[in-house]
Amino acid sequence: MYSRVAEYMENSANCDEIAFEWERIDSMARRFKQHLRPLLRTIDLSATRVNAPIQEAIHFLKTAFQKDRSLHQIASEDFPTDFFPVREKRYLYQRNETGQKHLIPDRYEFLVYRLVRHRLEAGDLFCRDSVHFRSWEYDNIISSLYLLDFVDSPLLRKNVQTALNRGESYHQLRRAVSYANFGKLRFTSEDDQHLWHECSRLVTNCIIFYNMTILSLLWERQEATQDMAHIAHISPVAWQHINFYGRYEFTKASEPINMEEIVEALAHHPTISVWMKEIPG
């Protein structure tokens, strides 16, 4: 075996890689049968497609193992073979002394194990008793119930649309903040780009916090007069009153913002919506 590998590496001989792989599998037959046969006997596998060919092969092997029948004692024509991959098919047979072609049982068994693994990873096969399947099935039930509620409940649809509108409003504000310098990007590296996005997010959140502070104070003031209906429809994601393109001086001592004065002016304003953009939700 190793001489063939050496010849192949030296390009002095042609080597059938698939045939070489099957020869290696033949040498490991006892090991994989010892570990995988007990699993195939005890685990019940289901297929997402009815009458899947691999299911027939699994049932055939389980039946043989439960009856303690050796695969070498079963005639080749009795093996289900509809699931054979085309590129592997010729490696699963060999000819005897009389020239008759017959199936190699160990390779057949290993091919079933290999395809079971591939089908499990692809989701074509599953075990109903597994924790993974139960989790998926439970999530699927929850998702189905939610979709039914979404179809039947106008209030739920309205709330979902409101949440989507809020997210879109936030992204609009992010774009407005990022458009400073007429949208020209000044960064030249990935680190600068990351810093740009984080600063944009920080400024956006500061604006929302500023708006929420004003609205909270205005709500507390108007709560005494029960005149709060119009405040509930004002979105904190607004920027008409923010100057993104002004001149910033950091050398002078900043004066604290008089929030009470702002709230007092808003309370007597005839139309608060002029000051702050109203977005549904």
Image (cartoon, helix red, strand yellow):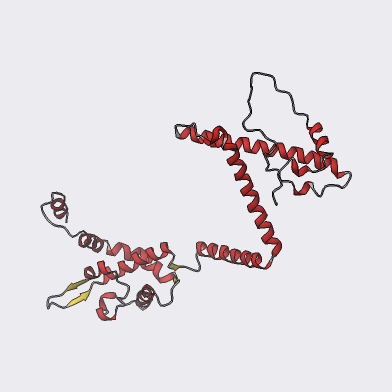
Towards the viewer: 97 or 165:
165
- Is 146 rendered above or below residue 239? below
From the viewer's perspective, tell me whether residue 15 is left or right of residue 154. Answer: left
Towards the viewer: 89 or 187:
187
- Is 272 rendered above or below residue 161? above
Towards the viewer: 23 or 162:
162
From the viewer's perspective, tell me whether residue 190 is left or right of residue 246. Answer: left
Q: Is residue 169 visible?
A: yes
Residue 230 at x, y percent in the picture: 80, 48
Q: Residue furthest left?
A: 12
Residue 252 at x, y percent in the picture: 67, 19
Towards the viewer: 142 or 26:
142
Residue under the image location 45 percent in, 71 percent down: 48
From the viewer's perspective, tell me whether residue 79 is left or right of residue 99. Answer: right
Q: Residue furthest right?
A: 225
Residue 78 at x, y percent in the picture: 29, 81
Picture quadrant of residue 275: top right
Picture quadrant of residue 212: top right
Which quadrant of the figure contains the N terminus?
A: bottom left
Residue 272 at x, y percent in the picture: 78, 42
Q: How many marks?
A: 0
Q: Is residue 75 visible?
A: no
- Is 148 rendered above or below residue 221? below
Residue under the image location 64 percent in, 21 percent down: 250
